[in-house]
Image (cartoon, rainbow, N blue to C red):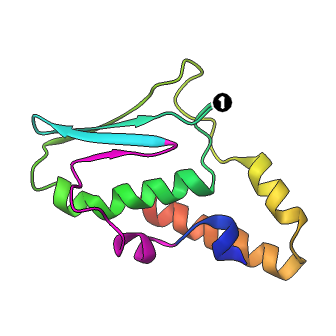
Amino acid sequence: MAAQMWGQPLSAVQGRLAHNMTRFNGKTLSWELMNGVVEVALHREPCNEIGAQSLEEFEHLAAALPVLEQKAQALIFYSNLACGFSAGGDLRELYRGLQAMEKQAALAGIKEFHQRIHHVMN
């Protein structure tokens, strides 16, 4: 159940990467490689909280980085939203998801989500 609630791990995302990795337009973030610069725009309302969809799209970016870094000299992250850069983890989504789970499954899901975030952000 954790995989359904928290999205898919990086290994699953790597297997589904599109042929053209220089541009991506997701529900929560987008990126484009132009003139040696990868620009990553965050655009998840209300303030770029990191939830299951955001994490999956960050994993997509992480999987694309080995190809992108061959053509890029810089990587820039910015927000398309006026609220600011990011509010952090989506605690509302986390809370709602945990309500339907037994304690052990919830703890395992939180641990997996936390490990995936660290893997992507490191």
Residue 121 visible in image: no
Determine the residue located farthest toward the front in the rendered image: 19
Q: Which of 53 and 91 is in front in this view?
A: 53
Quarter containing the C terminus: bottom left
Quadrant location of residue 70?
bottom left
Residue under the point 36% across and 70% down: 16
Task: Tell me if residue 14 comes above or below residue 96 in the rendering.
Answer: below
Image check: 117 left or right of 39? right
**What percent of the width, then of the height, locates residue 43?**
50, 33
Residue 77 colored in magenta in the image: no
Q: Is the magenta stretch mostly helix, strand or loop?
A: loop
**What percent of the width, then of the height, locates residue 79?**
46, 28
Residue under the point 69% across and 47% down: 90
Residue 44 visible in image: yes
Residue under the point 89% across and 77% down: 102
Q: Name the residue under label 1.
A: 46
Q: What stretch is highlighted in magenta?
A: 9-28
Residue 11 colored in magenta in the image: yes
